[in-house]
Amino acid sequence: MRVLVLGCGYVGKAFAQTLAEQGALVQGTCRSAASAEELRQAGITPILFDGTISAELAEAAQQATHVLASIPPGPEGDPALLALSPVWTPKVGTWIAYLSTTGVYGDRAGGWAFEDDVPTPLSIEAKRRAEAEAGWRGITSPAHVFRLPGIYGPGRSALEQVLSGTARRIDKPGQVFSRAHRTDIVAALTASLANPNPGRIYNICDDHPCASGEVIVEACKLLGREPPPLIPFEAAGLSEMGKRFYSECKRVSNVRAKEELGWKLAFPTFVEGLADCYEDLQTRQPS
């Protein structure tokens, strides 16, 4: 198995490292020498990518049997797809996956979002994601699309928000969000390797959409701290980006991924997920 991960960020690197530990030959893109060294330490061969194609990246794409694309699109489109399209025609049968966002569903007024729903993205970022999805699904070996909600995991959870003093509990009645632990996202991707269905779309999220304040309360409980006060949405003084975040309310269905991929959640709710993050935090804190 020769794997190319386009964008070794929080999820991409974890996926790459998982496959490298299983014996796969894994190459991954990054933007700096420091990140390249981190990838080497994780058993991943780094390729520097600044948005322009290189001979090294073109060769890696041609030789790859499995490709994960996780670089966010910019105003011009998906940088990896733009760079590779002139020099790369994926062989039919190449496993390709694109990490998108549940933001493409826009607002569902608290209702459920399913993969076959027509995307109605509201933000410019979500609109770009929808366009990138179409681009990746339009290549010779259509990409699987994995739509992700709020991502959390070790080092990136409500625990860090509480510890840094940035955690807020904003009260907007009826508002819920979906989320997914990084480990469960990687598990869904690896499950797809064994059950490929090119062009298929999957929502990857846990079983319990809920208000973000519930997650903060649980994080405070684990840390032995008092939760921050509940602030009415109208009095929260949110930025324009924050207001857009709260303008969308939906529950995201994960049934398809479970049924078709045989995907099993290690962390079906934020309670189990935060417990895992807390355990990791304890191992990283100096004794």
Image (cartoon, rainbow, N blue to C red):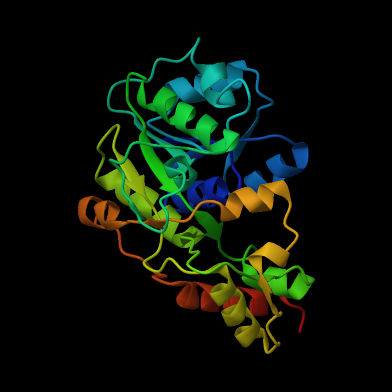
Tell me, yes or no, if residue 267 can be seen here.
Answer: yes
Q: Farthest residue to the left: give it.
A: 259
Front residue of 152/283: it is 152
**Residue visible at 40% across and 64% down?**
206
**Residue visible at 69% across and 70% down?**
168
**Residue visible at 72% across and 66% down?**
235
Front residue of 117/175: it is 175
Query: Horizontal and vertical percent for residue 267?
Result: 42, 70
Image vertical order of residue 236 relative to residue 120, above or below: below
Relative placement, left or right, of 185 versus 234 is left
**Rendered-image quadrant of the C terminus:** bottom right
Image vertical order of residue 130 relative to residue 208, above or below: above
**Residue visible at 51% across and 25% down?**
60
Tell me, yes or no, if residue 42 can be seen here.
Answer: no
Q: Farthest residue to the top: give it.
A: 86
Say how many tags the image has: 0
**Rendered-image quadrant of the N terminus:** top left
Query: Horizontal and vertical percent for residue 104?
Result: 45, 40
| Residue 116 picture quarter | top left
Query: Horizontal and vertical percent for residue 200?
Result: 28, 37
| Residue 54 picture quarter | top right
Front residue of 237/163: it is 237
Query: Horizontal and vertical percent for residue 101?
Result: 48, 44
Image vertical order of residue 47 relative to residue 52, above or below: below
Relative placement, left or right, of 23 versus 39 is left
